[in-house]
Amino acid sequence: MDHRLRRRTVAARLDELGVDALLVTSLVNTRYLTGFTGSNGQLLIGDDLELFLTDGRYTTSSRREVDGIERFTAERSYRQAVVDRCTTASVTRLGIEAGAMTVAEHRDLDEALGDAVTVIGLDGVVERERRVKDDDERELLRRAQAATDAAFAGILDRFAVGISERWVARELEHLMIEAGADGLAFDPIVAFGENAAEPHHEPNHRMLEEGDVIKMDLGALVEGYHADMTRTIAFGQPAAELRKIHDVVRQAQQAAIDAVRPGQTGIEVDAAARSVIVEAGYGDRFVHGLGHGVGLEIHEGPWLGTTRDDVLPEGSVVTVEPGVYVEGIGGVRIEDMVEVTSDGCEVIGVSTRDMIEL
């Protein structure tokens, strides 16, 4: 990954943003721009200015991970180093990541900089660049998805009456790691029967029974990149309405996948799926947005939903995950990551989206 190119791309936008330099304090954005994986790292970046800051715990590891940039180890806070560098680089307007800095941190930095530097809050500067994935990022996402597919395939022959949701969640974690994942992209959602009516159900001790639907939302993590997939299957014969709902959700997801292409907005793609569900009479049961970008974070831009006017760029990777949830009966969600290509999109992953009856 060309971290220097990424930094130069961000620095080239600073004039239009009205600042001389940008202080990156989001760990995810710092990683994107430098490769640093530790828990304390900041980046000061300007036209002719690049300074990485960390503390003594990461002096050695940052030397290995952060190439081609000056590194500074602060004994306590990074603030004084930022003040000193802003002075020597004649920075008078310093941008900060408004969404990544607390009010207290902003106050302390503003006081440390004094009247010589104006601090300006900015939104989404680095996040905008992260929306388009490069070849290395797409490969890591595919590796994460491959481990997720393997876990889904491996769990299918382990279902039996009496196992719990929590047991399945633990098994999925083990299977993903065995398939090459570094860990979990998020804690798996496993919901049996009526619990599947909760979009983000937390696995509990509910035991599997004949006739239950099983909703599983899972994802593997590989070198910082996340996968995200949901499948809803049946243990035995599902209720007729749940079989119907699965068909509706499957059709809705395909309609959205067919609508994904560069230039489409999140609202337009969401509408393609939502119209299928509304026509089937379940419009009020689709209670969340259609999807989101995936990368160094499990939820990032661009977003797909009824109020999301994000434009999908070529090279972005987003989820398509319609769902229908009926309290007391259960629910169905089907989710896949797709890569936006020049003429549409490509589904990442190989797991079947048809209803599996075990």
Image (cartoon, helix red, strand yellow):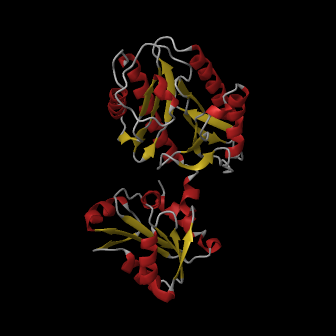
Q: Residue at x 28, y 66 (%)?
A: 59
Q: Nearer the viewer, residue 64 or 75?
A: 75
Foreground: 255 or 271? Answer: 271
Q: Residue at the location (57% across, 61% down)?
A: 124
Residue at 50% of width from left, 11% of height from top? 237
Q: Is residue 34 left or right of residue 120?
A: left
Tell which residue pokes out farthest to the top in this image.
237
- Residue 171, percent across and down? 33, 28
Q: Quadrant of residue 183?
A: top left
Is 64 located above or below residue 322 in the figure? below
The foreground one among 228 and 53 is: 228
- Left/right placement of residue 126 relative to residue 202 reads right
Q: Is residue 334 left or right of residue 207?
A: right
Q: Quadrant of residue 167?
A: top left
- Residue 35 drawn at (x, y percent): 41, 57
- Seen in the picture, residue 190 relative to 31 is either above or below; the reply is above
Residue 32 rendering spot, x and y as whole percentages: 47, 57
Check the image and name the residue furthest to the front: 328
The residue depicted at 52 percent of the width and 43 percent of the height is 138
**Looking at this view, is 143 or 205 the one in front?**
205
